[in-house]
Image (tube, rainbow, N blue to C red):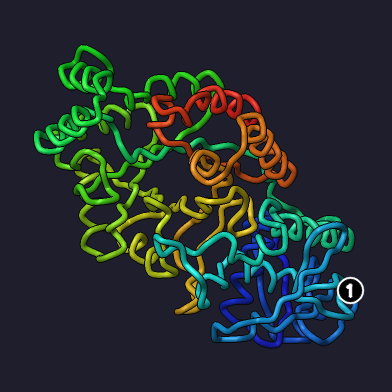
Amino acid sequence: MSILVFTPQITSRIKYAFHVLLHETCGIYDVKFTVDENQFKAAEGAKINYSHQYFDECINFIPHGLLLEKDISEHEIFVKRHLNTPIFFSVSKSILPFDPFAASFYLVSRYEEYLPHISDQHNRFMATESLAYKNDFLEIPVVNIWAGWVKELILKQFPNTVFKARKYNFVSTVDVDNLFAYKGKGLFRTSGALVKDLAGFQFKRIKERTSSILGYKRDPYDTFEAQMAMNDEHNIDSIYFMLFAEFAQYDRNISMYSPRMQVAVRGMNDYTTIGIHPSYRSNESDKIVETEIRQLEETLRSRVTKSRQHFLKMTFPDTFKKLVEFGVTDEYSMGYASESGFRASIATPYTFYDLEMEVPIPLKMHPFMVMDVTFIDYKVVDKQQTLDKIESLVDQVKAVNGQFISVFHNRIFSETEPEWKGWKKIYRQMLAYAKP
């Protein structure tokens, strides 16, 4: 069943915003548009009027104006509350006191990340610069909540409207920045590390390094089997994002050309989905990211369609256009390193929108909500507070039948550093709480 929308002008932004809110979030099967008043009035079934006119026998939304614009400019935004939920882009004489389509578009397109902003040391948009953080709704999937209000209004006036059922689901993802702590690093890197250990009198580490390299002991970061056992126990789907790159300052995995790396990756692919973890350097040129994807595909002997940026380094929209060009269909970088919550204020997968070209592109964004290093490196909280935060976010996602995605790193499971102690237990508890 479709829903008909009247608007005096059909823009790419309007079509996208209604697609995200009504189709991807609410579950309406089809959204049609018309600029013909007579056609709209004569039509039967569910109808939405998105204009400054008023029509009988439909749902009337007054547009804010953002979706009629064709440029990217600063907007003065005042956040209010409706039904105890933050809203903005207020309008009058509308069925809701704000424009949920324009507000959703602003958040989901990441409009504010195209504007001038303060970046961190890795040239990333900072969570503290976001509208959601500044107005205390970073941990609320407001787009899903607004979509729920729109769905209720539709069902109240058009009770026969059919919506596709949305079910909560959970995906555990693991970023493999370092497949091994010691193995496969090559003579030069290994020799340098041994010299450094000797200079620091790290004799325990020297023994551990030597035993791992010689095969007498499992490498500390080789935690894949333990993770799979926990996932299987709770029947949890997983995706592993592999840093498959040449060695550099922030890209310190073993070489993508290493036979040891290739054998390990092929072995993992038998048990889980493997995605690319484009390197820190990959933003420098198209050639770098293309080489990494193609080399991983050659190793796996299959297409690579899933991606998450190393260090979450991304530039809107260039990073995502490159990924689409090289065959990626699903992207998992939408989240912050320093804060948990909802970077795009949505808890369901959605289509990416290129604000520079004013078109959606064929890339499905999968936002993540929590990441281990957020609590280990950025937040000063104890283990129980961490678990409470994770469970609170799971509750938020379950309430809107969304997709909960967690990010862990294989090295954390080793618990070889003091700050990593106890994280296997947190992971296990999260699986038990977050599973559908």
Q: Secondary structure at mark 1?
A: loop
Residue at screen point 86% across, 57% down = 84
Q: Position of residue 351 (x, y in %)?
A: 53, 61
Q: Position of residue 26 (x, y in %)?
A: 70, 55
Task: Spot the residue most to the top.
Answer: 216
Residue 322 in sight here: yes
Q: Position of residue 161 (x, y in %)?
A: 79, 57
Tally of numbered discs:
1
From this view, report whether residue 182 is shown above or below residue 160.
above
Q: Position of residue 288 (x, y in %)?
A: 22, 59
Left or right: 345 as drawn, with respect to 236: right
Task: Spot the residue most to the left.
Answer: 187
From this view, report whether residue 101 is shown above or below residue 212.
below
Left or right: 363 as drawn, with respect to 140: left
* 240, 53: nearer the viewer: 240
* 210, 300: nearer the viewer: 210
- State which quarter of the image contains the C terminus: top right
- Dot 1: within a 10 Å radius of its alpha carbon, few (fewer than 14), some, or many (20 or more) residues? some
Identify residue for label 1.
57
From this view, report whether residue 169 is shown above or below residue 323.
above
Left or right: 276 as drawn, with respect to 94: left
Name which quarter of the figure residue 68 lies in.
Answer: bottom right
Residue at screen point 22% across, 40% down = 301
Amino acid type at mark 1: Glu
Residue 436 in sight here: no
* 340, 400: nearer the viewer: 340
Left or right: 306 as drawn, with respect to 117: left
* 1, 436: nearer the viewer: 436
From this view, report whether residue 49 is shown above or below residue 263.
below
- State which quarter of the image contains the N terminus: bottom right
Residue at screen point 50% across, 74% down = 114
